[in-house]
């Protein structure tokens, strides 16, 4: 017992608790209201903590996901001769940025670009529906709640605003500026978004807890793979060919930012100060690729194999 709160008996399960009213515990064991979670004494307490830097990096990753997908499909469907791609990229960033700001303003405390949260303690905090206890082995006590408030629902709300903003802004923009494309081609990036938004929503709803712990490694691996694929498809085998076009530099620095983002996120799992020198390794994969690309050129391998025979 502490803070004048007297607990008559312990509630079963990991997430069942009693509500506190006027410094006294009331009601039977059950689910805590939204924005609260149980403490050690099985009493529902409000989430008043500030998210850690790792939590913000996770939210940043989930916020970047639809933006990167927008950019990919805009580039994929805009065509090489289309001058509308850049404006569509800027519009997609504007949509996601406005959605993020609105989501933060509508989250407690309302009207501020900050949130209050409950600390993530273990993986089960993301899947409380799997931990509803059965004290008498017959009846189930339902205590499903958002123990990681608001990290679970804030992403879903953000995706909803992104979809609304896209439907309000993008069709009018594309109709006016993408005149060089066919009537069906110009809207394909929007159609693609109508497919990937449900996918990323289900991904967050089902795998949010797994993504919370795995996203640094996902960023690092995917950014390395996509950079290697891009450099191979663009036939970049020297520093001169890399800096020959501004677009290639933009792609390169974007991947470097993702490399650094992933490294910092991984380092936060340990001690950030001791791991910051690892950021010096960000250009490493690019330099390694350029140094070894000439030795893995398919035409050279085939010619050497033919000369031996």
Image: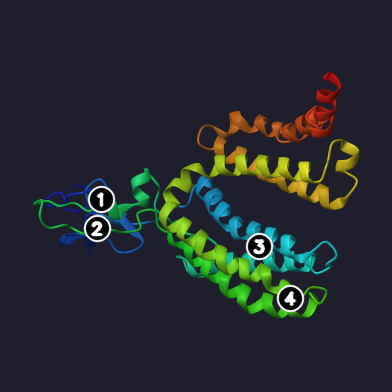
**Left or right: where 247 falls relative to 257:** right
> Of marks 3 and 4, which one's residue comes earlier in the chain?
3
Left or right: where 291 falls relative to 70: right
Residue occupying image coordinates x 57% and y 52%: 61
Name the foreground residue: 74 vs 20. Answer: 74
Q: On the image, numbered disc 3 is attached to which residue?
A: 70
Q: Position of residue 52 (x, y in %)?
A: 49, 47
Please tell me which of labels 1 and 4 falls first in the chain.
Answer: 1
Left or right of residue 33: residue 193: right
Q: Secondary structure at mark 4?
A: helix
Judge whether 43 appears above or below 121 on screen: below
Among the two numbered marks 3 and 2 on one chain, the one whose residue lies closer to the N terminus: 3
* Residue at 46% from the left image edge and 56% from the top image edge: 204
Residue topped by disc 4:
174
| C-alpha distance separating marks 1 and 4 | 48 Å
Give the alpha-carbon distance from disc 2 to disc 1, as whole Å: 8 Å
Discs 3/2, front: 3
What secondary structure is marked by label 1? Answer: helix
Q: Quadrant of residue 195?
A: bottom right
**Residue 201: image x %, image y %?**
48, 61
Distance (Cα) linking label 3 and label 4: 13 Å
Q: Are marks 2 and 1 in contact (CB under 8 Å)?
A: yes
Residue situated furthest front in the rendering:
309
Q: Are marks 1 and 3 in contact (CB under 8 Å)?
A: no
């Amino acid at each position: 017992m502490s803070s004048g709160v007297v607990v008559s008996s312990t509630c079963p399960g990991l997430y069942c608790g009693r509500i506190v009213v006027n410094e006294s515990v009331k009601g039977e064991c059950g689910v805590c209201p939204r924005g609260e979670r149980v403490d050690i004494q099985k009493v529902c307490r409000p989430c008043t903590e500030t998210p850690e830097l790792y939590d913000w990096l996770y939210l940043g990753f989930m916020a970047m996901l639809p933006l990167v997908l927008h950019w990919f499909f805009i580039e994929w469907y805009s065509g090489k001769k289309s001058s509308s791609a850049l404006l569509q990229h800027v519009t997609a960033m504007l949509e996601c940025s406005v959605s993020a700001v609105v989501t933060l303003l509508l989250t407690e405390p309302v009207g501020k670009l900050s949130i209050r949260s409950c600390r993530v303690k273990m993986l089960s905090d993301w899947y409380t529906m799997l931990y509803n206890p059965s004290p008498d082995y017959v009846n189930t006590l339902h205590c499903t709640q958002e123990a990681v408030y608001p990290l679970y629902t804030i992403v879903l709300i953000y995706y909803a605003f992104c979809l609304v903003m896209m439907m309000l802004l993008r069709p009018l923009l594309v109709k006016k500026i993408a005149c060089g494309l066919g009537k069906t081609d110009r809207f394909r990036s929007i159609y693609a978004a109508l497919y990937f938004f449900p996918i990323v929503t289900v991904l967050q709803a089902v795998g949010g807890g797994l993504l919370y712990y795995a996203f640094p490694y996902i960023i690092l691996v995917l950014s390395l793979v996509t950079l290697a694929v891009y450099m191979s498809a663009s036939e970049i085998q020297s520093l001169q060919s890399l800096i020959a076009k501004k677009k290639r530099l933009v792609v390169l620095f974007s991947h470097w930012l993702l490399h650094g983002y992933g490294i910092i996120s991984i380092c936060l799992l340990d001690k950030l100060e001791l791991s910051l020198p690892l950021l010096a390794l960000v250009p490493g994969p690019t330099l390694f690729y350029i140094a070894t690309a000439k030795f893995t050129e398919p035409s050279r391998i085939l010619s050497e194999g033919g000369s031996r025979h």
